[in-house]
Amino acid sequence: MDSLMAERSSAHRDLLRIDLPEGPPIPSPFVEADRQQAVADLLAGNRFVPAELPPGPYALRLELREGRLLIDVRDAQDAPLHAYLLALGPFRRLIKDYQMVIDGHEQAVTEGAAEARIQAIDMGRRGLHNEAAELLQERLRGRVEMDFETARRLFTLVCALHQRI
């Protein structure tokens, strides 16, 4: 077993499934690839521990409803355990900026832009991801403990859901 496989097999996993609502397709293949990678990475390793629930693993259903993020936590057999509803207002600027960065990245790649430009766009994207992850952790503090990488990947999924609106 190579070192990557050893890392993945020993990774902490509180989430065993991520469900997103059916809806219109995500308009950008780049955003869809980002969404798929976020789900794969979440399933490979994550830390998501709701404070008042029995130990996982859990399944998450994520939806946007009336300007809010619904995080529906379920047990392994898909029985509802608890739902968290977060206002998206504090995330709106980050979601909008993230979409502009993704659009810029897609355009740069399509146009065959210089590698330095693409790397600069990626650095901006990482910065937005980091800021959004910190905000998500803050908004769920005391209710759900999650690591930074889990928060980053969940934000990616929020942005992908937002694309469908």
Image (cartoon, rainbow, N blue to C red):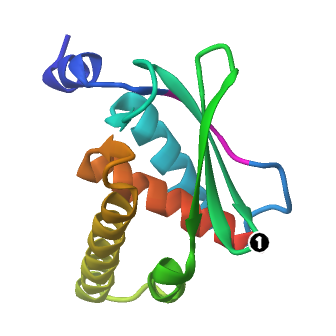
| Element assignment for label 1 | loop
In this view of the protein, which residue sits in the foreground, 151 or 98? 151
State the quadrant of the C terminus: bottom right
Which quadrant is the N terminus positioned in?
top left
Label 1 sits on residue: 66
Residue range highlighted in magenta: 16-20
In this rendering, the answer to whether 45 lies above or below 123 is above
Residue occupying the far left of the picture: 3
Q: Where is residue 3 in the image (x, y as percent from the top left)?
A: 14, 22
Q: Quadrant of residue 160?
A: bottom right
- Residue appearing at x 25%, y 24% in the figure: 11
Res 28 seen here:
no
Badge 1 amino acid = Glu
- Residue occupying image coordinates x 46% and y 20%: 57
- Residue 19 part of the magenta segment: yes
The residue sitting at 42% across, 32% down in the picture is 52
Secondary structure character of the magenta stretch overall: strand
Residue 54, picture quadrant: top left
